[in-house]
Amino acid sequence: MKVVFSDRAFAAVMAETTEKIKTETGGLFLGSFEDGVWYVIEAIDPGPKSIFEVAYFEYDQQYTQHLINKIANLYDKKLSLIGLWHRHPGSFDQFSSTDDGTNSKYARMRKEGAISALVNIDPEFRLTMYHVNQPCRYSIIEYDVGNHLIPDEMLQYKSPERFEKLMTGIMNDEYKDFRPSVSLNGFLKVVLPYMKRIKINESLHEVGDSNLATERILDELVEDTAFLADEQGIEYSISQVEQFICLSQDAIDVPVKLYFRYIAEKDAVVFSHGSNCYLYKSNEFRRAFEQAFKAQKENTRQRIQYDRGASLSDAVKKIIHINLNGDGK
Ligand SMILES: [Zn+2]
């Protein structure tokens, strides 16, 4: 197992360290894990409202989420949150107990665990890369830097043609006759029948580190929030309530509040609507919407066939009727 940084991601880590040379700092890694290699495609800064103390750091969550959104949107392939880094004072290149907590939460986000790097300036820049296994076992792993070590498609931005297609799609609006409404309630009525309902055992309910739980939820929600806003024209607000992320809309017709939460034991995100609970993963709303759209098209076709069928049998009846009449003559 090893780590490969894109030139840009590594430069971003160094730039952030340089900028905050006199204090602590850190950041998040975006990329993917493939065939035993962690590809760090982008490294994003912790944001203007982050707090850095010697044994404690906290990201500016709104800012990082915004940035994850923006950056992920540029790339052809999906980027996800695969790890983090932060600077330690002096030559201390091991994790504190606070770090253990943070790292193990990141490691629980995916079965392969996560990566977590420490930066020291002693007195030169030094980066130690760790792989964090579940629950929290560390092993130092090698890292390399260079775009040439990364498969081309991972570095690929969406092409101008792809963007144009997306724009045309939005402008031409292939779904224009199938737009439930700008109300979240209307949208849900259409998609919920195509989503998976599950039962949640309340004893599994775990509060844990609410920041990590909500980060995980937001990571899954990123693409659908853009889909709801940009393609469906649904206005909503997102807020954090303890360990929940609440997606709500109260202005249009029926007020809706969807509470998303992360179930660590199942490694799953779920949301509740009324008394039901639904499994949620990245792009789930889009998928359910497209399925509903297909089903509706299918329905329309069947109805047309049925109508044709009906008029055909009417015609047959008429013929029979005529014949009967003929016979009756
Ligand atoms: Zn630390």
Image (spheres, rainbow, N blue to C red):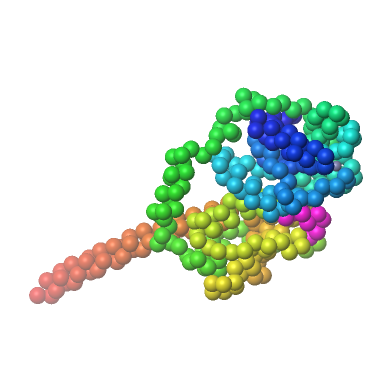
- Residue 116 visible in the picture: no
- Residue 7 visible in the picture: yes
Q: Position of residue 203 (x, y in %)?
A: 81, 62
Residue located at (54% from left, 58% from top): 229
Residue located at (63% from left, 41% from top): 79
- Write the start and end of the magenta stretch as one range: 204-214
Q: Position of residue 206 (x, y in %)?
A: 80, 58
| Residue in the foreground of this view, choosing between 190 and 9 | 9
Q: Position of residue 51 (x, y in %)?
A: 80, 50
Quadrant where the N terminus is found in the figure: top right
Residue located at (71% from left, 43% from top): 45
Q: Which of the 4 image quadrants contains residue 145?
A: top right
Asked if residue 114 is positioned above or below residue 267 in the image, the reply reads above
Figure quarter occupied by ligand 1:
top right
As drawn, the residue found furthest toward the top would be: 148
Q: Which of the 4 image quadrants contains residue 7?
A: top right
As drawn, the residue found furthest toward the left would be: 329
Asked whether, in this view, residue 191 is left or right of residue 243, the answer is left
Q: Magenta stretch containing residue 73, yes or no?
A: no
Asked if residue 93 is positioned above or below residue 279 in the image, the reply reads above
